[in-house]
Amino acid sequence: MPVDIEHKVTVVGLGYIGLPTAALIARSGCKVTGIDVSAHVVETVNSGRVHIEEVDLDGLVQGVVSRGALVASTETVAADTYVIAVPTPHDEAHRPDVTYVLDAARKITKVLEPGNLVILESTSPVGTTEKVAELLAAERPDLKIPGRCSGTPDIFLAYCPERVLPGRILVELVDNDRCIGGITPRCARRAMTFYRRFVRGACVTTTARAAEMVKLVENSYRDVNIAFANELSMIADKMGVDVWDVIRLANRHPRVNILQPGPGVGGHCIAVDPWFLVHGAPDESRLIRTAREVNLAKTSHVIAATSALIARFPDVRVGVLGLAFKPNIDDFRESPAVEIAAALVREFGARIQLVEPYAKTLPDELSGTGAKLVELDDALSECEILIVLVDHDVFKSVPLEERLDKTVYDTRGLWPDQPEGENLGRVHQLA
């Protein structure tokens, strides 16, 4: 598609969401500038390469960069539409930090012009889009900002969160429905027109506050359901019951659909977003808080159980399989597998061998610990204990004969054909 030089878009933040979004907008025919604080990211994108692992993203970026539809820069440039897709972390007390969002909005104010559209995509606490409006009004008193002026505003401001699955981001950014919240209905309609350029899913408009809460509710719902499965797994451990068998049989009920347990919950969405609701309404969010605490407790449970298992075999090597927060991706943000691996390395040192097929180097939490990455085949031949933390497809493919003589602690139910032994989250003990 030819580049529409009449419509210019600036995407602030070229991370896991910003870069795919920028590339899709560029493919739709707009002239896109991607802004990032990292010179390395900018250099990588401008060379037509990618700095993150995502299916088909490398080819898309190479294509739009090669025809001049997408360029990257460390400096904010003027555009017709601005999309903010920067991180929104939380601190140790689980309080949300919107500093990156406000910093990005502040940079945009320097180049804002009447008629511009500003869209916040970053997952944010309820009320953040209004804070952006306040900032724009304070920084640019010459402009009428929606929600902060009387009469017809000069600027359009909306909130539209992504709802994508890593490994399917490009598909889901196009096919999934979008919830678009405007500071005013007119703002929402203007943003909907923009998303119609590259989104095939339904675009539904609402208020900015409602859209902000929708994103948080979606991930809190998933967190609560995962917490139920994880709590069941800990109860089953205590009662000496195979939790995988219990869930399989319970799910034969026509109105029951229990999820599969794991070593905790990771990623920058499900492990983070519920805290935004808890922080905003602490007295009313008791179930959501409890679910977060259950999922954090499951990680601690796995650390204690695997540590006790390894201690029973003082001279053997241990293969820890997986560090990513979910299968078949290279994303280690908030990963319970990384937390578990780091705890085991601190306690058992070089006995712990880490296997992560989607990592070229260790995540920051494991750098400097003395831990090392090894190939799966080496772990299978050298390690007598295997701890499964991530259900990567390559791990699923390991046949029974290659692990028959292993002690296995399986947090994912990856190998149901492994001969049963002591039931500690599906531990299969050496004879």
Image (tube, rainbow, N blue to C red):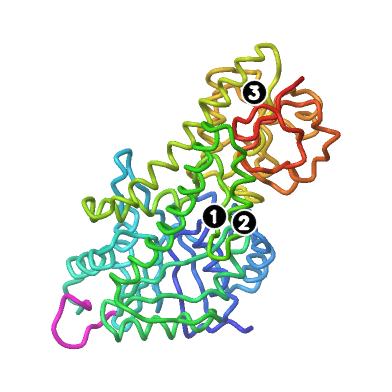
Residue at image x 67%, y 60%? Answer: 55
Up the image or down, 128 lies above or below 179; here it is above
Residue 352, labelled with which disc?
Answer: 3
Q: Quadrant of the rendered structure where residue 378 is?
A: top right
Identify the mark nearer the N-term, 3 or 2. Answer: 2
Indicate the amino acid at tag 1: Ile
- Residue 295 vs residue 418, the one in the foreground: 418
Mark 1 lies on residue: 258
Q: Would residue 327 be found to the left or right of residue 85 on screen?
A: right
Q: Quadrant of the N terminus?
A: bottom right
Tell me, yes or no, whether the highlighted magenta stretch contains residue 52. Answer: no
Residue at point 67% right, 14% down? 313
**Left or right, 38 with reference to 363:** left
The mark nearer the N terminus, 1 or 3, is 1
Q: Secondary structure at mark 1?
A: loop
User: Circle 2 sits on which residue?
Assistant: 50
Given residues 405 and 242, the one toward you in this image is: 242
Dot in front, 1 or 3: 1
Compared with 378, 42 (above or below) is below
Frontmost of labels 3 and 2 is: 3
Closer to us: 324 or 285: 285
Quadrant of residue 128 within the rendered picture: bottom left
Q: Closer to the camera: disc 1 or disc 2? A: 1
Q: Amino acid at mark 3?
A: Ile
The x, y position of residue 267, in whole percent, is: 50, 49
Could you tell me the amino acid type at mark 2?
Val
In-image side of 79 versus 143 (left or right): right
Within 10 angstroms of label 1, few (less than 14), some, or many (20 or more) residues?
A: some
Give the magenta part as a residue range.
145-155
| Element under disc 3 | strand
The quarter of the rendered structure image containing the C terminus is top right
Q: What secondary structure do most residues of the magenta stretch adopt?
A: loop
